[in-house]
Image (spheres, rainbow, N blue to C red):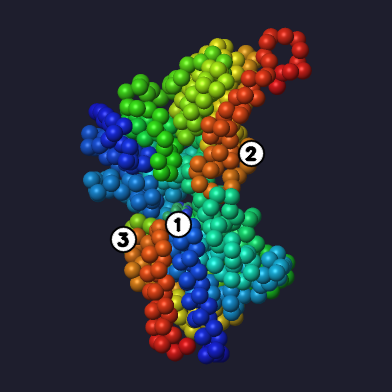
């Protein structure tokens, strides 16, 4: 079953609000990893607002679905979701990056309820996620584990060690997303360190690999539904995304991997996001 | 062989420490064709991108793959090149450590590791990016020289000295700008030799990296407000350590404080403690640094103050230390 019109509209509005919240948080912090936060956002929205079983009031609930943001620098996007869901106070976003704050660039599971793993050192998350998935099997629990990797992050050999082990252990209760936004810090992934043929690599490692538009809730929905019933091969979802998605002057510009914004720039971001939303709901018929 | 570089403070005030490193290395590379640079998607962040502009065919960006980078550097060094790796400190001393240990240090290869964003200098990024154990880790590697420059010009000196030395070197620098300690490059920088920045007889503050400027500030303030004469040693080389300067300080001042943007376990403070303990002379001793803890999140300067490794923290500890009595007596009650 596809997404209902109402559900699609709800997700679109949510993503739109959260994009504004990300811009505001970057403004509070003075700077931030805005590009990669905006590219990964729709995947996180799809998970947190539609698929995942979780209880903001009980962040340590044993049966919750687990989420590992392996590309931890997108924490500034994840934080807006946690604030919206009530894991943390919305006001806390105003302290992002400030001395003594619990919220720094990379969200820390020791400090922030709702964060399942302290990430930030790239190439760790998928192994941690696999551990969670294997624990579910061991403990006879039905929770699922979701992990989002950056594409540049996949340069790390440890990602492929985890990939090999996921298919070896047939951890089909783990869904791997790759935010394929084509950029890392120093430039385009194909220029810095060629990843292509990328999906083929995941296939060769034993994954049922889907390639989708990571900004389409319909495509995300179908892919995740498919992944959740997998029983033979674990599923990897290569999400084609746009770094800086929604802000026209940031889109596809790797200089906005990490950037500083002031009130004026924030204003431009907000305007651009509104236009983006209009266009998106028209095109997608939400 | 590397010839020379000479920069003035004026030429470098507008450059962050990493920018001075990148400039120095690029200038020296002009004189030594063996120098190559490797980075792991950190050309922009570690400022070494300028080297790529000047020597595109001597520059290798391996992507986000530190272990791979250190392995490649090892192979290059085995074949006569002088590879400089340009990476964050935490990803050098932790993420790539097995390769650093076995492929570089054990085989005593001529790899120079420039480790940026050290200590809490990337404070806002949190624990995954703080590097507060790296001195301890790297100091324990046989064959490795460990240098923690206090500012940009000292970094330039360290880079130059590292090229002249045959063997692996770890140079630990901060993100952003350091306060200026040295007003030029000609102050006799020598690997393994501490630089005495102030003389004094009441106590010695031994510091490295960002602690050095704070130590000088503290010593000035202490002289002014308390009449305490503090000696300040910039112990820029943690290994090989300047045993002589440390023991001289013990004998002549009997009170020692170490200051580092690093855990007090195993780093500068640990290294100095080993020398003092084996030296057999009693002295009052305190290590300032992270007190066996991970750091909170925040701006570097705020975290320096939180961890009491800024001038105020040093002054506070000095005052406490001056109250302790270390006469040679049989009374162990007051010994610490
Ligand atoms: C082990 C490690 N090395 C280096 C870094 C520094 N770093 C932070 S983000 C980044 C680029 C990440 O690129 P990608 O995974 O494509 O993320 P995205 O473009 O989606 O933001 C790098 C190199 C890090 N956080 N961890």
Q: Is mark 3 within 8 Å of ligand 1?
A: no
* Quadrant assignment, res A61: bottom right
Q: Earlier in the sequence, mark 3 or mark 1?
A: 1
Which residue is label 3 attached to? A191
Q: Are marks 2 and 3 in contact (CB under 8 Å)?
A: no
Which of the labelled discs sits on residue B292, or is there none? 2
Quadrant where the C terminus of chain B sits is: top right
- Residue A279 in view (yes/no): yes
**Viewer-side label of 2, 3:** 2
Helix or strand or loop: what does disc 1 sit on? loop
The residue that appears at 28% across and 45% down in the rendered structure is B51
Label drawn at residue A30: 1
> Circle 3 sits in a helix, a strand or a loop, which is it?
helix
Q: Residue at x 49, y 39 (%)?
A: B101
The chain ID associated with circle 2 is: B
Q: Chain of mark 1?
A: A
Image location (x, y in percent) of residue A163:
52, 64
Q: Is residue A166 visible?
A: no
Image quadrant containing the N terminus of chain B:
top left
Where does the image place residue B41, in percent across and percent down from the top left? Answer: 38, 53
Badge count = 3
Circle 1 Cα neighbour tier, 10 Å, few/some/many (<14 / 14–19 / ≥20): some
* Whether marks 2 and 3 lie on the same chain: no
């Amino acid at each position: 079953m596809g997404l209902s019109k109402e559900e699609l509209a709800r997700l679109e509005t949510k993503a739109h609000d959260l994009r504004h919240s990300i811009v505001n948080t970057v403004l509070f912090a003075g700077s931030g990893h805005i590009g990669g936060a905006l590219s990964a956002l729709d995947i996180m929205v799809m998970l947190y607002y539609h698929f995942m079983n979780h209880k903001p009031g009980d962040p340590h609930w044993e049966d919750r679905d687990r989420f590992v943001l392996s590309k931890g620098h997108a924490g500034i996007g994840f934080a807006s979701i946690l604030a919206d869901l009530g894991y943390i106070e919305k006001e806390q976003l105003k302290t992002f990056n400030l001395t003594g704050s619990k919220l720094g660039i990379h969200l820390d599971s020791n400090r922030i309820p709702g964060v399942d793993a302290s990430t930030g050192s790239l190439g760790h998350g998928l192994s941690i996620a696999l551990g969670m998935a294997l624990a579910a099997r061991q403990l006879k629990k039905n929770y699922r584990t979701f992990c989002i990797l950056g594409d540049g992050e996949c340069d790390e050999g440890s990602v492929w060690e985890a990939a090999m082990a996921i298919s070896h252990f047939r951890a089909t209760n783990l869904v791997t997303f790759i935010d394929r936004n084509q950029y890392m810090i120093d430039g385009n992934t194909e220029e810095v360190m060629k990843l292509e043929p990328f999906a083929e690599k995941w296939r060769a490692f034993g994954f049922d690999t889907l390639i989708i538009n990571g900004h389409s809730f319909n495509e995300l929905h179908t892919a995740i539904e498919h992944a959740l019933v997998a029983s033979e091969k674990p599923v990897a979802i290569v999400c084609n995304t746009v770094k800086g998605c929604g802000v026209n002057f940031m889109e596809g510009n790797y200089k906005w991997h990490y950037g500083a914004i002031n009130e004026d720039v924030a204003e431009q971001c907000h305007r651009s996001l509104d236009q983006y939303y209009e266009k998106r709901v028209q095109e997608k018929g939400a | 062989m590397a010839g020379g570089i000479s920069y003035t403070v004026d030429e470098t005030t507008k450059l962050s420490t990493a920018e001075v490193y990148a400039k120095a290395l690029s200038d020296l590379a002009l004189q030594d064709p063996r120098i190559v640079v490797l980075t792991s998607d950190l050309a922009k962040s570690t400022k070494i991108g300028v080297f790529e502009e000047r020597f595109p065919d001597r520059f290798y960006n391996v992507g986000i793959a530190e272990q791979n980078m250190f392995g490649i550097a090892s192979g290059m060094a085995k074949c006569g090149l002088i590879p400089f790796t340009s990476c964050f400190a935490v990803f050098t001393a932790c993420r790539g450590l097995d390769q650093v240990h076995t492929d570089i240090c054990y085989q005593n290869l001529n790899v120079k590791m420039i480790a940026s964003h050290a200590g809490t200098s990337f404070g806002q990024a949190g624990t995954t990016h703080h590097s507060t154990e790296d001195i301890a880790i790297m100091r324990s590697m046989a064959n490795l020289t460990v240098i923690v420059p206090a500012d940009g010009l000292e970094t330039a000196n360290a880079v130059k000295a590292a090229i002249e030395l045959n063997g692996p070197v770890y140079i630990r620098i901060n993100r952003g700008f350091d306060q200026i300690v040295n007003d030029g490059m000609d102050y006799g920088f020598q690997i393994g030799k501490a630089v005495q920045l102030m003389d004094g007889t009441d106590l010695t503050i031994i510091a490295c990296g960002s602690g050095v400027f704070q130590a000088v500030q503290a010593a000035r303030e202490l002289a002014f407000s308390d009449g305490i004469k503090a000696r300040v040693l910039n112990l820029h080389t943690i290994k090989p350590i300047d045993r002589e300067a440390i023991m001289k300080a013990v004998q002549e001042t009997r009170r020692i404080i170490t200051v580092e943007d690093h855990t007090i376990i195993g780093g500068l403070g640990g290294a100095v403690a080993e020398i003092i303990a084996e030296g057999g002379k009693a002295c009052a001793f305190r290590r300032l640094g992270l007190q066996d803890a991970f750091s909170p999140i925040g701006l570097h300067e705020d975290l320096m103050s939180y961890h009491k490794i800024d001038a105020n923290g040093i002054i506070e500890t000095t005052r406490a230390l001056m109250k302790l009595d270390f006469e040679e007596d049989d009374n162990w009650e007051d010994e610490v």
